[in-house]
Structures are given as C-alpha cells and as structure tokens.
C-alpha cells in the first residue's frame, strides 16, 4: 500500500530544548503513544530540540525529571529512526560523541523529503 | 505538495525552521503574527518562495496591513485557507 | 473530506484558539466533516468551564461547546496535559481527592492515543499552536 | 532588602514558575523579605487549586501556598487575567453565576494596582516570564 | 528627590504585535493602571511592539477588539511619553505618517539610558 | 548598573532585544533556555559583554552544559543570582 519513499506513519518534530518548557516532553509522549499503538515513528530533532540528545543531562533544580529518561526508553518502543538537523549540531557545536543516542544528521532538502514521506506530521 | 502554516514573525526560530523544511513545491501560508512577514520591508525574509507565499486576509486586516503588503503575496480569506488545505496533501504548522 | 484539529494554545493568551474555531466553522461551511478537536499542551484551557471573559469578547469555551453540539464534533482533551494544569472533570476530581470540577461535557478527558488515531484516520489534521 | 516577584508563566508549560519559586526561597534564605508575589498573564495558573501533577513532579501550587503561609507572603493574582482564564474564587464564581471555584486562599484575586504598588514600594522586583 | 535624568516612575516595554497574543493588551493595562494611580509612565514600543502604533487596525476576525482603542485613550491618562525602537521602524518600513500616535524613535544607547532612568521597568 | 535576565536562546527576538537595551556597565544573566547561549559555539552571539556575562549553575547542570560552557562566563548558583540582584540597582527580564 505504501510506496518506497514512505518512511512511516508519524513524524514527530521536536524543536524545544529540555527543561525550559513542556514542549519536548509532550512531543515525546505523543511519539511513545503512537509507538505503543504499533505505529512507525520517526523523530526529528530540529533547532534547540537537538539539545535533547546531549549526554549528561540531569534533573532540574526542583527535582524535575527532564526528558533524558524518556529518550532512554525509545528503543524499547521500537523508535529507532532518529534524525537531527545538521545546522543545529553546528550551531551548538555538538558531535556524535556527545550524544545520548545515535541520530542521523539531515540537511534542509532531506527534511523536506521526510515531511513529505510520512502520513502524519506533528510539530512540537 | 504540503501546506506550511506560519504564525510567527520573520525574525523567529519558527520562521527559519519553516523555510528550511519547505519542499520545492510546498506552499507557505502566513497567519496571525506571521502576516508581519507580508510587509514589503520583510521581503528578503522569504527567498525562493515566489508564487507560493500566501497571507490570511482577516489577519492582515486586523493589523492594518491590508493594502500595505508586498506584491506577489496571495491574500486568502479563511475559506481560501480551507481550500489550500484541500489542495495540499498535508499541513505542517510552525509556531 | 474528513478533518481533525489539534489545538495547542490557551484562549485569550494567544490568537490560536480564535483561528482554530474560525477555521473549524469555515471547513464545516464548505461541506467537510470535522471528526474531532484534540486539545493538548496549553490548548486544554479551552475546556475551562469557569472561564469568564468580558462580555464584549468572544467566549471561546462556549464557542467550542456550541460547535461540538451543533455538529456532533468530539471535543477531546488530553487527560495528562489537563490534570497538570488544573483541568479535571468530576470523575478525575474524585480520584484526586478534590472538590468540584473544571471541565464538563461536551468536553471529554481522553488519552493521547485519540490524537494519533484522529491524525491517521482523517484526511487532514490542522494544528494551531501558540 | 524588600523583594517582590512578578510571575507571568504557567506552571508545567514553562520552567519559569520553578525558577521563581526557587528564587523566592533563596532570597528568604539570605535574610531578605518577600513583600508579595504577583501572578499575571499566564502566571495566574499557578493558583489553580485543582492542579494534579504526577506525584513524582514538584507541585507548584502547593509550593507557593506553603511559601506564602510560612513567610506571610501575599500571593496576589490579577483578577482580570484570572477571570478570562477560568480562575475564580467563590465570590467571583457567584458573581458570574458559576458553580464552584478554582482559586482559594492563600491566593487572593486582586487588581493590577497592587503590582504597581509592589514594584514601586519594594527595593527589587524580579520578573519571571515564559 | 529625583535627579535630572529621572524620566518617571514606570517604563513599560511592549514587545508584541497586536492581535496575536494578549501581551500587548496586558502590558497596556498595567500602564493605564499605573497612570490612574498618578504614576508617570513611559511606553517603549520595541521590536514587533512597534506595530501596535500602525494606523488602520481593526477588530479581529472573531470580533476581538484589539489594542488600537486603548492607544487612543493614552492621552486621557496623561501617558504622552512614547518611544519606539528605530530599528523596528526600519525593519517594518514604518514612518511617522503611518502611526496612530507620535512616538519618538530611539536607538540602542538611548534605550539603555531609559531603562536606567526609571524606578521600575515592566517588560511585556 | 542593571541586571538583565535572559531565559531564551541566542537566535530569538528576546536575546536581540536584551543585547540592544544593555547599558555599557549592565550585567547579563542567562537562565533556563538562556543558558544555551553559554555554549562555546554561541560565543559570537554576545559581543561586547565580556566580563559581564553570567549563567545559572543549576540550569547548565540540568541540561548537561556544565563544564561545556565557554570560558569567561561566570557561573552562579541561585544564591549568586540573589546576590547579583542585590548588587544591581534594578533587574529587567527578557523572555
């Protein structure tokens, strides 16, 4: 039913850094729920969202859990297609060795292709 | 072909991200504070989107921007907004 | 076509709720169906039954409720996002040992699975963010 | 010194409420006084008595209430901003013909004049925004 | 009690455009209340806030009143010290003839001086 | 001398506005998402603020940025934050 360029049901775009707001957590929750319903999910970490992948995050100063523990669970939910904006890695000086999880860097052209290749895009 | 919906002004991360994820045939609709990008002085903010850039009539009007917007921007009302979502395969909102 | 709306912004603080309600009315007027409105993130505040805006301003909570009842549109509020933000129906209030409720029908508290379902089942999902 | 805090962001949606509460505790620990916390814009949601966050997360509404009671800090919620957003005490609920209330003591609904008064009367006003 | 560089009690900075959010309205409300309590108030329209001054605004598509009627009342409240960021005028291509009310354009140096010269700064 | 408090990342209108309103002796404290500006790769975002740029310890730490921040940024904890507000005449928050 799907053509060869179809990468999955759901693309969740995460554009916010951890701890500063609930966007990242609420975006990840949507991804986990979709995966639990056996949907194929791709995550795209865009702009500040790339910082979600940084190793060494902790709890917040008031004991807020943050999102690193959720990222650690992605594999259990079979969410293994992780993309990260190339430009964000450059902007923040991040390289693969500093990331919690492997994510494939993508440029603008590839991002547009990913948006076109999913049945549903949720942008957080 | 996708419809991208932008409700933020040009000098925001949301606008940069929308432009960077825009496919070559995708359309971009400016709504709410996004219509600030319709000002002629902001023209340089949307390179390569000629003929694919729309702005919502009602939101231009409320802000006093109707008639002050740049040439080449296609003005649609809310019915035209619905029509754009019909014509495009999917929508992505940037906020 | 079958449409769904995802609303992520609170009323009054942002224009997004106005835009979403207006878009909902316009798509129905063009003969489409609206299979559901899902309220997530700060969008859950659109279900605040105690909202009392000045009388010369649009009443968004009533606007959604009227639309839902007139067209049989489910108004689904993410339960996890709502509880954190003080939006509970009577059942949840009891469960959390609180008196009173801040959400009532036709809004219904439901899980995020409904959003995924709506999004994949409908021809179009339109998101309105803050 | 005499401090005041202006909080403009909702809890859970933004970190600002956490930052503000933490800053409030720290200034008290350094021997300053906190003459008032004023909740405006989406900050009014910090007074939502029905908020039910997960038990492993900080409960900001209770946190403010405890701080207010322990140190005699007035917790002033802008009434105009609150009514629009569904935050009413019993008196306002009655006035608007609604059953129930979403704000209770030690939070108090008050006018914006209190913010100006606090800001000009105190040595320092610190704003926390979304 | 005040030195000569003291411009007034309260500086209200307005950084948001009309209609898109309640920031502009809530900022103006704070300014009006302060003026009603006989405080001297300066308004600084910064960034997108400059668009609040544009002539020809109307009600919103749902009948939202917007903020232009409030601006028209500023004089009644004796709020007549209006500043607007020079750069914002340039960014949006605005000139004095397009504005509802006269506002004095200020550059970065002057903005810093204004912040220093008021007893209280509220930033919306 | 004022203390400016910034809780947004460098590529936002809030950051541009804070820098543009910063007096020559004013200090700038990065908190919450503002600490993203403490990354060495973002150094160019704060020209002319040498010696007057601070970042909140707890917010760096929660994000995994502690030890990864640029030289020359002074790290303060919440007590240091209060001390900065004592030392400065007034604070202005940019968000």
Image (cartoon, coloured by chain):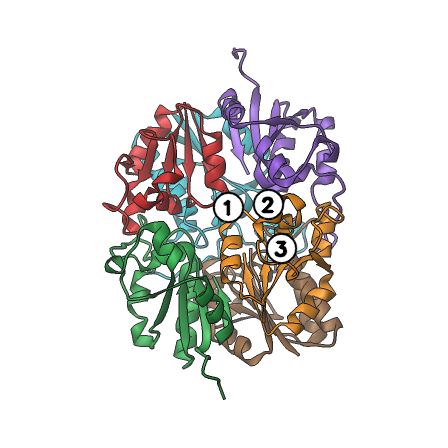
Chain colours: A green, B orange, C brown, D cyan, E purple, F red
For the residue carrying disc 3, how many other residues have a C-alpha within 10 Å: few (<14), some (14-19), or many (20+)? Answer: many
Q: Are marks 1 and 2 on the same chain?
A: yes
Label pair 1/3, CB-CB below 8 angstroms? no
Identify the residue at image location x=42%, y=39%. F6
Is there any visible trace of residue E62 in the rendered image?
A: yes
Residue that label 1 marks: D43
Q: Quadrant of the C terminus of chain E?
A: top right
How far separated are the C-alphas under marks 1 and 3? 15 Å
How far separated are the C-alphas under marks 1 and 2? 9 Å
Q: What chain does mark 3 sit on?
A: C
Secondary structure of the residue carrying tag 2 is: helix
Q: What chain does mark 2 sit on?
A: D
Secondary structure of the residue carrying tag 3 is: loop
Identify the residue at image location x=60%, y=58%. B49
Q: Dividing the picture into quarters, in which one does residue D56 lie? A: bottom left
Residue that label 3 marks: C51
Q: Nearer the viewer, residue B48 or D15?
A: B48
Residue that label 2 marks: D81
Give the mark nearer the N terminus: 1 vs 2. 1
């Amino acid at each position: 039913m799907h053509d060869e360029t179809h990468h999955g049901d759901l693309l969740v775009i995460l554009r916010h850094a951890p701890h500063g707001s609930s966007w990242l957590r609420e975006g990840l929750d949507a991804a986990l729920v979709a995966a639990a319903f056996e949907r194929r999910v791709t995550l795209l970490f865009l702009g500040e969202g790339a910082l979600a992948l940084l190793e060494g995050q902790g709890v917040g100063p008031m004991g807020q859990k943050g999102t690193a523990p959720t990222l650690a669970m992605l594999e259990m939910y079979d969410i293994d297609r992780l993309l990260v904006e190339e430009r964000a890695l450059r902007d923040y000086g991040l390289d693969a060795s500093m990331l919690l999880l492997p994510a494939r860097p993508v440029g603008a052209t590839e991002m547009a292709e990913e948006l076109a290749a999913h049945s549903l895009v949720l942008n957080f | 072909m996708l419809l991208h919906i932008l409700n933020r002004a040009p000098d925001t991360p949301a606008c940069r991200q929308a432009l960077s994820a825009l496919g070559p045939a995708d359309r971009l609709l400016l709504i709410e504070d996004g219509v600030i990008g319709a000002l002629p002085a902001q023209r340089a903010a949307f390179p390569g989107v000629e003929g694919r850039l729309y702005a919502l009539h009602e939101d231009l009007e409320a802000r006093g921007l109707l008639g002050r917007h740049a040439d080449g921007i296609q003005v649609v009302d809310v019915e035209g907004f619905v029509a754009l979502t019909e014509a495009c395969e999917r929508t992505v909102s940037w906020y | 076509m079958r449409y769904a709306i995802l609303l992520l912004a609170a009323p009054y603080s942002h224009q997004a709720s106005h835009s979403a309600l207006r878009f909902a009315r316009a798509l129905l007027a063009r003969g489409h169906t609206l299979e559901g409105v899902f309220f997530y993130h700060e969008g859950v505040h659109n279900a605040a039954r105690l909202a009392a805006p000045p009388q010369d301003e649009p009443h968004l909570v009533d606007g959604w409720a009227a639309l839902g009842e007139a067209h049989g549109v489910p108004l689904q509020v993410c339960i996890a996002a709502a509880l954190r933000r003080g939006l509970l129906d009577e059942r949840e209030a009891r469960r959390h040992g609180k008196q009173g409720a801040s959400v009532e029908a036709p809004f219904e508290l439901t899980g995020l699975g409904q959003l995924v379902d709506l999004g994949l089942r409908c021809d179009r999902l339109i998101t309105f963010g803050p």
